């Protein structure tokens, strides 16, 4: 069992768990490990100087992120970013995003709901004034912006389809939020889109949305491809995380 380093009474436990998760995620996303390499729990814990519990929890979170996968032996293995359907899914995404804006131009459709959009705009103004650090999990905030924009358009089916597409590309879209410049630009572009829609300038909002999603796809493809290349270069190289290990204490 784990000793005092990771106990529920320790006020820093959540922070340290998040640090283990963040460090493993960083190494995975820069392609430090070969594709399909096994991440042996005991070795990961030893390399990071922590007990196995936060490592186990981090691997579960990384599995949900799509950065690792579970083998038939129950172990965790490095997953390769899946770019096979990325362009098709981005094409579907931009179609849904643009329709969410352009349907307000139909004479029989009520415009976007300001009771939804105004709080959304205010939320992103606050992020502009107090910008978060680069973090792949920023993808969840980004998704929330786009889904909320769609919800404000009044078409629930459109919104649920967009949410489903976002879930399918989330693992690779995390690559968009590794640097401060991309966080900054995303925030500014989101504000531009929301403000154009609130002002009734739908043509300008459509142009801004198309540019925003297109730039995101280019960044995601480039960074994920770079990680895949690094994984391939590391193939066959042994590292501390995948060497066989004797079972230690839980």
Image (cartoon, rainbow, N blue to C red):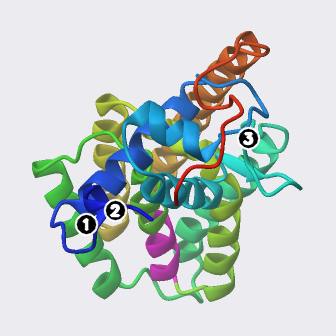
User: What label does residue 79 carry, if any?
Assistant: 3
Residue 149 included in the magenta stretch of the image:
yes
User: What label does residue 121 carry, if any?
Assistant: 1
Q: CA distance from mark 2 to mark 1?
A: 6 Å
Q: Magenta stretch: give its range.
A: 146-153
- Residue at numbered disc 2: 194
Q: CA distance from mark 3 to mark 1?
A: 36 Å
109 horizontally vs 26: left or right: right
Chief SS of the magenta region? helix
> Which of the 4 quarters of the picture holds residue 155?
bottom right
Q: CA distance from mark 2 to mark 3?
A: 36 Å
Label 3 residue SS: loop
Label 2 residue SS: helix
* Quadrant that contains the N terminus: bottom left
At 51% across and 71% down in the image, what residue appears?
Answer: 147
Q: Earlier in the sequence, mark 2 or mark 1?
A: 1
Mark nearer the viewer, 3 or 1: 3
Q: Is residue 173 above or below residue 61?
A: above
Q: Earlier in the sequence, mark 2 or mark 3?
A: 3
């Amino acid at each position: 069992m784990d000793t005092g380093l990771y106990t529920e009474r320790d006020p820093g436990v959540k922070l340290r768990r998040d640090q283990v998760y963040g460090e493993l995620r960083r190494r995975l996303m820069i392609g430090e490990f070969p594709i399909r390499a096994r991440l042996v729990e005991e070795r990961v814990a030893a390399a990071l100087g922590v007990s196995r519990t936060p490592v186990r929890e981090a691997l579960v979170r990384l599995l949900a992120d799509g950065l690792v996968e579970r083998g038939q032996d129950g172990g965790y293995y490095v997953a390769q970013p899946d770019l096979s359907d990325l362009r098709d899914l981005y094409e579907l995404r931009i179609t849904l995003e643009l329709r969410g804006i352009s349907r307000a131009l139909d004479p029989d459709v009520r415009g976007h709901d300001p009771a939804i959009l105004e709080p959304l705009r205010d939320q992103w103004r606050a992020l502009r004034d107090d910008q978060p650090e680069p973090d792949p999990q920023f993808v969840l905030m980004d998704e929330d912006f786009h889904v909320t924009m769609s919800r404000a358009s009044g078409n629930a089916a459109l919104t649920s389809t967009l949410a489903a597409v976002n879930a399918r590309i989330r693992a690779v879209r995390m690559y968009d939020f590794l640097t401060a410049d991309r966080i900054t630009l995303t925030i500014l572009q989101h504000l531009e889109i929301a403000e154009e829609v609130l002002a009734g300038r739908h043509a300008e909002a459509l142009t801004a949305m198309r540019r925003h999603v297109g730039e995101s796809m280019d960044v995601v493809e480039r960074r994920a491809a770079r990680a895949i290349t690094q994984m391939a270069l590391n193939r066959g190289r042994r590292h501390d995380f995948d060497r066989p290990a004797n079972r230690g204490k839980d």
